Structure formats: structure tokens, C-alpha cells
Image: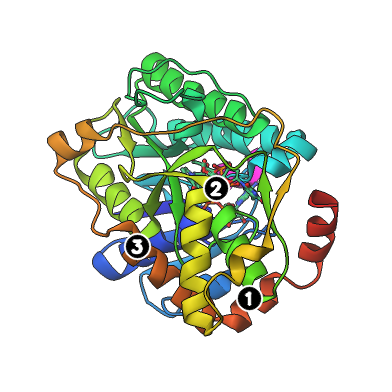
Amino acid sequence: MKILITGGAGFIGSHVVRLFVNKYPNYKIFNLDKLTYAGNLENLKDIEEKPNYTFIRGDIVDGEFIQNLFNEHKFDGVIHLAAESHVDRSISNPMEFIQTNIVGTVNLLNSAKAIWKDNFENKLFYHISTDEVYGSLSDEGFFTEETAYDPHSPYSASKASSDHLVRAYNDTFGLPTVISNCSNNYGQNQFPEKLIPLFINNIINEKPLPVYGKGINVRDWLYVVDHASAIDTIFHNGKVGETYNIGGNNEWKNIDLIKVLCKVMDKKLGRQAGESEKLITYIVDRAGHDLRYAIDSTKLQKELGWKPSLQFEEGLEKTVDWYLANSEWLNNVTSGAYKEYYEKQYK
Ligand code: NAD
Ligand code: DAU
């Protein structure tokens, strides 16, 4: 089996590539990544020499390049993670999101359709998406697979659009597709522009912790390794044409999560209790900020037998330990362009 994984040098993608390369030595895994600011081959150092692994640098927006790649390698399966993924960047620069998340996805769909030529046996196009397509919840209720789409940011609207296109290729052309929509991930190798790694980095450097609005927004956090294992389960056992929600059943109000993180960091850094909390700084809210996300993953748990492996407290400690032990990784990704982004975003 030849599997194309897109966005495999990014945060979640690198965990998926590692899992597949190690667990399935008989599969040939191709990692296609443009290596944007979010892509980092350092994430895959431990597996880069494996005989069943190939890295290809390229842009999914380039339709001709993508078609040639499919013609050359004749992939049997696609796990599509490549995306512009950060909500704040989608507010300052939406066009990148339209190109990569929408046009890039259609290029992949077209190439899969062309190479598989209506002989879809044992083929699968697996699209990785987000719970943000469902919009925002009030204090009650959960997103299920039947929840109507209601995206609010250019990021979530572009992901919603790509989900619709994937379903349209299944309905119209019979392309064998499956989609999963996951909640917020955390863990090692996450670029420090997202809440948890950004705050870990700022606490290390004793910089302000910029909390949007009142810090009352709620997110459902899942350890990235558990997302990768859900992707493995769905890729192998999911039903064609179906959608699966993935979540941690682990809701946290931002400010509560931040306070727990501050405590863990004080302990790990040998600082006085309460030191890191003093860095909390409330700033102007994110535009169109969704209040609450919460996933109902009953379908995935009941039908495919997946469940998360870790409690949040354990996952958070592991994550903090990794960032503290990998200061070189953190320093490398926060030099250069990161500084410019940071100044603009938090000015
Ligand atoms: P990320 O930003 O860390 O990684 C994205 C990767 O895609 C990077 O390696 C980047 O170089 C690559 N990429 C970007 N544009 C590309 C292009 N035009 N061509 C080829 N490669 C390109 O993202 P992530 O957090 O790992 O998210 C991966 C996927 O999972 C995304 O589709 C995202 O929407 C989805 N998702 C993320 C989360 C989360 O909490 N991070 C939750 C649910 C779903
Ligand atoms: O829900 C899944 C989504 O989770 C994924 O699809 C996205 O790719 C991923 O980036 C993430 O989106 P969020 O916007 O929820 O994640 P982020 O880490 O940017 O923010 C989490 C919460 O923390 C959110 O309510 C905004 C808040 N926040 C974030 C940052 C970066 C702050 O208060 N301050 C900050 O500086």
C-alpha cells in the first residue's frame, strides 16, 4: 500500500507519519509538505532514515505538480492534513487559507479521481478536518456528526468548504472518502503560536501571557498522539462516505487551563508558586471568537472502538516536559520570522 500523507512535517501530521512508518513497515509512506513556517523536518528526525519513508517538498496548490506526483507514485490512499491552520493568521491573511485549504484540497481530489479512474476498490481519500466548522456552542450541548455547519473565521470557513468538496466528490463521482472533525490538539512539536506552546514559551521567557477577552472561551483538548491513533483507526476501519467526530471529552475554560499550566510551569522551573500567574495579561478579544467547542465522539467510540489514552493532567505534564527538554527546537522555530509575527499579532 502506498499512502500519501500531506502536511506530514506539521504538528499533527508528524505524529501521524511517525505512527504509520513505525506501525506499518510494509506500507510505503510519502510525506508531501511545502514546509511553510509551520512545517519542520526536525519533527521527523527519528524516522527520516526508515526504508518505508519518503519526503517530498511541494505545494498542494500547484495542480500540475500534484497530478504528476499521483501519476508517478499511484498512491492507494491519501491522508490529507496539509492546511493553513491558525485562526489568527486567517484573520490577517485569509487568501492563503482559501488557496491551500480549498484549492489545494480540490487539486488532491482531482488527482486521486484521475489516477483511480473509477476503479475505487481498496482506495481511500481521508480528509482531516476540525470541529470549528460547526461554529460555536453556548453553555450546553455538543457537536455531533449531524450538527449543521456554521463556521465563523476565514480558517473554519475554508475548512468547511473543503469538507463540502470532499463530500461532493463522494456523492457525485463515487470517490471513496472519509472525513474526521477533531477538537483542539496539544502535545509536543506544536508551533508556539497556538495557546499552549505559546504560553509555555512565554512563561519560560517571563513574557506576558496574552489572554483574549475575558478568558471564558471553552475548548475541548485532545493529546495529539490520541488524534493520530484515531486517524489510524478511521483510515483502516472507517466506513466510506462517513464522518467521524474526534474529541477528548475534556473541556476547559481558557483561563482555568492557563492557571493549571502556570502551576505546572512554576513547579517544573523551580519558581515560587504564583510567579507565572502574574504574567497573565487580558488583551482585546479575537474577532469572531467562538465561545465554546465540545465534541461528542460517541460514534467513533461505539462503532470503531477508539478512545483517548491519556488524562489531560498527564498529557499537559508530558507536553511541558518535552518543551523544557527541547529548548533548541523551540529556539530554532522562534527565531527570525516568528519575532515579526509576534510583534504584529500582539502589538
Ligand atoms: P500545522 O499548521 O502544524 O501543519 C500544517 C502543515 O501543512 C505544515 O507542515 C505545512 O508546511 C503544511 N502545508 C501548509 N500549506 C501547504 C501547502 N500549500 N502544500 C503542502 N503543504 C502545506 O497544522 P496542524 O495543527 O498539524 O493541523 C493539521 C491538520 O489538522 C489541518 O488540516 C487542521 O485543519 C487539522 N486540525 C488541527 C487541529 C489542531 O488543534 N491543531 C484540530 C483539528 C483539526
Ligand atoms: O478546534 C480545533 C482547532 O483548534 C483547529 O482546527 C485549529 O487548527 C487550531 O489552531 C485550534 O484553534 P483555536 O483557535 O481554538 O486554537 P488556539 O490555540 O489559537 O486558541 C485556543 C484558545 O485560546 C482560543 O479560545 C483563543 C485563545 N487564545 C489563543 C492565543 C493564541 C488566547 O487567549 N490568547 C492567545 O494568544
Q: What is the secondary structure assignment of the residue under circle 1?
A: helix
Residue at 53% x, 18% y is: 150
The CB of the residue at mark 2 lies under 8 Å from ligand 1: yes
- Left-right relation of 62 to 43: right
Disc 2 from disc 3: Cα separation: 29 Å
The amino acid sitting under disc 2 is: Ala
N-terminal-most mark, 1 or 3: 1
Instruction: Please tell me the numbered disc located at residue 82.
Output: 2
Mark positioned earlier in the residue sequence (2 or 3): 2
Q: Residue at x 52, y 46 (%)?
A: 254
Which residue is disc 1 drawn over? 204
Instruction: Assess whether mark 2 and mark 1 are in contact (beta carbons under 8 angstroms).
Output: no
Which is more foreground, mark 2 or mark 3? Answer: 3
Please report the residue visible at 63 percent of the width from the left and 76 percent of the height from the top: 204
* Disc on the earlier residue, 1 or 2: 2
Crowdedness near tag 2: few (<14), some (14–19) or many (≥20) residues, C-alpha within 10 Å: many
The percent coordinates of residue 277 (x first, y second) are 60, 63
Which segment is the magenta one?
Answer: 62-68
Quarter of the image for residue 92 reads top right
Q: Which circle marks residue 313 in the picture? A: 3
Q: Is residue 242 above or below residue 297?
A: above
Counting the numbered discs, the total is 3
Tell me residue 14's x, y (percent): 46, 63
